[in-house]
Image (spheres, rainbow, N blue to C red):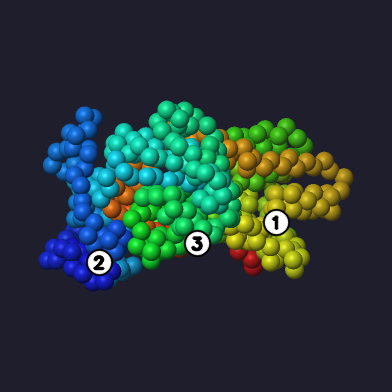
Amino acid sequence: MALSQPEATNVAAGAHQSLIDGGNSLSFSSATLQKLPHLTDYLVHLQPHSNPLDQNPFFHPTDGFYITSSDIILRQVVYDLSATFPAPSSHRAYHRAGPRNQIFFDPSTTKVAIVTCGGLCPGMNTVIRELVIGLWELYGVRQIYGIKAGYRGFYSTDPVELNPKIVHNWHRKGGTVLETSRGGFDLTKIVDAIQHRGFNQVYIIGGDGTMRGAVKIFEEICRRKLYVGVAGIPKTVDNDVGIIDRSFGFQTAVEMAQEAIHAAHVEAESAVNGIGLVKLMGRSTGHIALHATLSSRDVDCCLIPEMGFYLEGKGGLFEFLEKKLKENGHAVLVVAEGSGQDMIPRSDNQKEQKDESGNLVFLDVGPWLKSELNKWWARDHPDELFTVKYIDPTYMIRAVPANATDNLYCTLLAHSAIHGVMAGYTGFVSGPINGNYAYIPLEEVAQAKNEVNTKDHKWAWVRSVTNQPDFVGT
């Protein structure tokens, strides 16, 4: 398998790999290794230092401990050997995350900034804590600062000093102790503040909008040729960040969503013709609704943004719910917040409204759907009892601390980011690809989306569990 950079530089030529099974074979002729920016791209005289992990009493580096440039992670690992669906001509690969034997920062003079932006998500405090602990304990960095109130905090408030004692119990708290906000992105003011305060490393925790801002910060730092490494740690409870396996906080969100679904099921089951309606997070993707539905098994219908639906007529939602009520006397309906936005009446002014992050302001699908359900039943069954119990657990889910799985995940994300920046890489995101941690260019992550594939086995599993219609109109 030959490796090449996007500029077609041959990293490792002449290799060839074949997978054989039952007479079928698949050959890799090349893999395109995504270029990872490095400080020496524009600071050509920057000299490396030996990694202080060599002297760390808790580590005993041996052969294979340090990651090298030949360690890569393939983006695609599943192939069809029947050749029904031809494999791509070039296989995308990324640098593997982890410690390098040389670093490009002197820990004794390195000054670090950590910022959280956008909405809340379980695990934000854990990421902050592990960045501080990792920088302090692994590399000996002593100048670590938190930026308060999101991007605007770079130029509007003084940074707060952080150390292991201060952040010791932060992983037990929901939200972000550093505080957060949307908007406030002023590129010149932000980079001026980074330069003026002498920060050498900037760790940016946030969602897709925050990552797009991080790309601009990285590009401006490169233009000014500043000695500053930039790393993004993608945060979105919706799990809509592309390329990486999942975003932190997602598994905690699914776990908490099940509690809301269980409550809705109890309410619906305890009423005559009761419907439990739960709205879950998911502006553009329905991952939380999907996984919570599969985990709960109490859900009769799951509505997500990737799959349209309609209310009236054959194969519609009302027909399906009426059947469920006749069979069971109750039903549970889960809807992601981004579902049905094209069905909710919207004024011309509402069509143009954007939030501080530049996202279209969504109308609230929960109360609208509850109203439509009540109008349908009053019209078609005026003399029969009917109840819709509506639950919106959005802020309860966002505000809880991360569970054990997400806490561990946050630690690995933070430490992977630290190793990458200390090694001189910049303008990247750390995250797992097919279970292995990699460094991905910021711009690539900022542009990628992780939508639910409604043609794959997982969505088919949802429909088999709920027996809901496919909402394909006749």
**Quadrant of the image occupied by residue 89:** bottom left
Q: Which mark is residue 5?
A: 2
In the rendered image, residue 456, in percent from the top left (x then y), is placed at: 45, 57
Q: Residue at x 49, y 43 (%)?
A: 159
Lower sequence index among marks 3 and 2: 2
- Residue at image mark 1: 363
The front one of 262 and 171 is: 171
Q: Amino acid at mark 1?
A: Leu
Which residue, given by chain and number where applicable, does mark 3 sit on? 188
In percent of the image, x 47 and y 42: which residue is there? 146
The three-letter code of the residue at mark 2 reads: Gln
- Dividing the image into 4 quarters, which one contains the N terminus? bottom left
Q: Is residue 48 left or right of residue 121?
A: left
Helix, strand or loop status at disc 2? loop
Is 322 placed left or right of 259 in the picture? right
Position in image of residue 466 (x %, y %):
58, 47
